[in-house]
Image: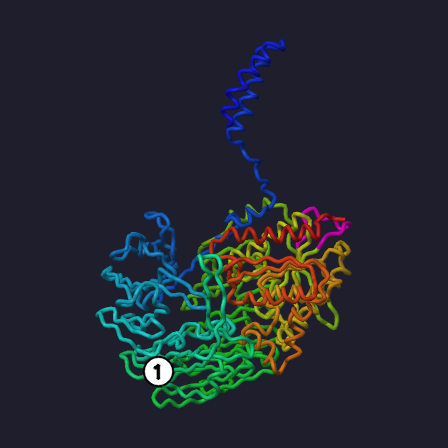
Amino acid sequence: MANQTYQLFFPKIKNFISRRILISKSVIRLSTILLVFLLLICNGFPIAAQTENPSLLTLDRIVSKEFDPEVFGPAVWLENGLGYTVLENSAAIEGSKDIVRYDLESGHREILVSATRLMPPGESSPLQIESYSWSKDGSRLLIFTNTESEIRRDIKGDYWVLDLTVWVWRKLGGDAGPQTLMAAQFSPGGRRVCYIRDNNLYIEDLISPKITQLTFDGSCTIFNGKPKLCTFSMFFWESLAGTKGFCWSPDGKSIAYAQLNIEEVPEFYMINNTDYLYPRIISFPYTKVGGIMPTFRIGLVSAKGGETRWLEIPGDPRNDYIVQMNWAANTEEIVIQTLNRLQNTVKVMLADVATGKIKTILTESDSAWLEPNTLHWLTGGKNFLWVSERDGWQHIYLYSRAGVNIRLLTPGEFDVQFIQAIDEQGGWLYYIASPDNPTQRYLYRVRLDGDGKAELVTPVDQRGTHSYQVSPDSKWAFHTYSSIDVPPVTEIVRLPKHEVMRVLVDNSELRSKLEALKLSPTEFFRIDIGEGVELDGWLIKPFEFAPEKSYPLLFWVYGEPATVTVLDSWGGFPPYAHNWQKNRYLWHLMLAQQGYIIMSVDNRGTPSPRGRAWRKAIYRQLGILASLDQAAAAREIIKRWKWVDPERIGISGHSGGGQMSLNLIFRYPGLYHLAMPSSFVSNQRFYYPGYQERFMGLPEENVEGYKNGSPITWAHRLEGHLLIVHGTGDSNVHYQSFEALVNELVRARKRFTMMSYPNREHSLHHRGDVDTHYHFWDLLTRFLKKNIPPDPR
């Protein structure tokens, strides 16, 4: 069309200009050039797009990889002390990885297995490695690949073993089809591998073609050796998964394993409306609060096969959780930890392998709940380490094998976050703590014999959050540190002097990009809400902040016992957070650039290192005390800072933060004017026992707590602007919560906005799903700007 227009009209226009107007030839040339240029535009001639302002954030920039931090690893320490291995991009085959070994002392780099050699017979391209492990002597490599994950199921895939001494490949499983194996483990000697197939345990000899089936009763309801046995189908809280589903004895002669039976557990149903011509029903076993639990039992079987001998564990197999199962630093006993359904009494037991007799060596109880624990054996099994809050602070204790408390290793009014490493040869215990600032994390060490004081290992001038991956001999560590506005740096250090040997990742490019942005630094603060309670928080101000003006305020909240939001770490998230969580921080920065103040506050009940009383204040009132703290903090913030507009207060949160956002706008309608919750629990009865019962008790014993802590109870009080978001394929917090709240809001004749994302899981996007990610942030941004405009007043 544009060409035809050019041919028809261009000669006429030119003749008209020549006949009618006396102008110079140069002007005619300019007119011709201008007209041709305009017609070329009609033809689609490209015009250079306006250069994006490098100082401003946009959603396109946020969801791209532009601001993704470079991450080191994952790295695998070699047992023989010869260094570590990592996966690195291959120069030989694009899109593939080499397995590279680094020497600790010199940093010498050696390609152990190149991508060209990661091609077993019959494979046309290198294996895409999901994970890998080495035999103890480093001669064999076990690779997990071709993986597939099902809803509420563990990841299955294919396992290959490469013998590096002769460069011979072996695919495990015999005649098993693809994507049917899981949880493979080398034997202590590295000659055999035990794995799960069709919910049964098998052992495969790597020298001969022999495969021995150990269990035969595996089915769709009976699971033998299932990994993360404590988290199956969300029956248990994630952090209780401190054990494998099976484990080799130290001499490689036996296998101890747990069996899970879900025959009586109800099925939960979801529907997939979009991926097929006809909708498909998706079902999986799921126990709701107060519902029927699966049963567990622990068995012993010879690695040669034969009958399983079941241990007679005292307690109720239907209502007791198995927190830990492992060999007790020898081949004669197995250590078992059980937790009752209320999760307030833990028992540590030793089971005699020969006789089957079980004795309880330690019992601990709490008036609220108990934190997950794992025994760390010392002195060849004569002693073990135990973590407890019994004195009001989380500390590490040394116990004898008989269960006698020998000494407290970390005295003081502070919390140990967790045990980092044990240098038994040197006599030191390493742990993470932050006695002076609960928003930060540091590495300390203390002597195992109790002599002397604790020593700070992390350099005193590196303020922020530090994480470590310590070598088996405790002489080396991968050290990653960051602060809330500063991306992480990873280096390899020598312990205990924390001597930096090499910087592995410095994120200098990302730092430069951030420095080019118009940003105000994040500020930490404490807010006094009365009765001696002070809450930690952070805030981000607009770049051109003027204290005489009044700005809208958006709170980002979580507020439940699973995590904190006020952490002096890159983006405010723990070091293990995913990039999509980091992008929430970038979204906050973008909103601040547009004129919003962004804040986050940690209420009582969050897992901050501020003592047992702080963390357990919310027992039996989840969603009640926490929302009271958040509202009190908002009122005090309005009083303290006059530049906060009290008529433009919003709140947003995901998952537990979504539940908190709903509770706040429903319970305090005059204080909050907008809420944007996503993937939330609207009724606490809809969630699973391992989490909800842990903090709320049994529903029949806490009827009012479950009712008053659930946002749906208060939906009729909505006055502000509400946007609710959920994925229909959420197998963690079910879409049921969303629809139940919609019904209640409709019944109360309340106006609200809703968005459902078909088949999206709890995080609202699949791996690499940039479109949903963009749409979600754009949805929230538009809703916020429409209902709480960012203009300063």
Question: Closest to the observer: 515 or 202?
Answer: 202
Q: Amino acid at mark 1?
A: Leu
Q: Main secondary structure of the magenta part?
A: loop
Q: Quadrant of residue 329?
A: bottom left
Q: How many marks?
A: 1
Q: Is residue 164 above or below residue 543?
A: below
Question: Closest to the observer: 479 or 25?
Answer: 25
Mark 1 is surrounded, within 10 Å at the Cα level, by few (under 14), some (14 to 19) or many (20 or more) other residues, namely: many
Q: Quadrant of residue 129?
A: bottom left
567 in magenta: no
Question: Closest to the observer: 424 or 669?
Answer: 669
The colour scheme applied to this rendered structure is: rainbow
Residue matched to label 1:
300
Residue 541 x %, y %: 68, 52
Residue 314 x %, y %: 46, 88
Q: Is residue 700 left or right of residue 300?
A: right
- Segment tinted magenta in the rendering: 540-552
Q: Is residue 751 left or right of residue 120?
A: right
Q: Is residue 788 above or below residue 170?
A: above
Residue 535 can be seen in this image: no
Question: Closest to the observer: 139 or 83?
Answer: 139
Residue at x 68% of width, y 52% of height? 596
Residue extending farthest left: 208
Residue 491 can be seen in this image: yes
Q: Secondary structure at mark 1?
A: strand
Q: Is residue 361 left or right of residue 667?
A: left
Residue 345 x %, y %: 54, 84
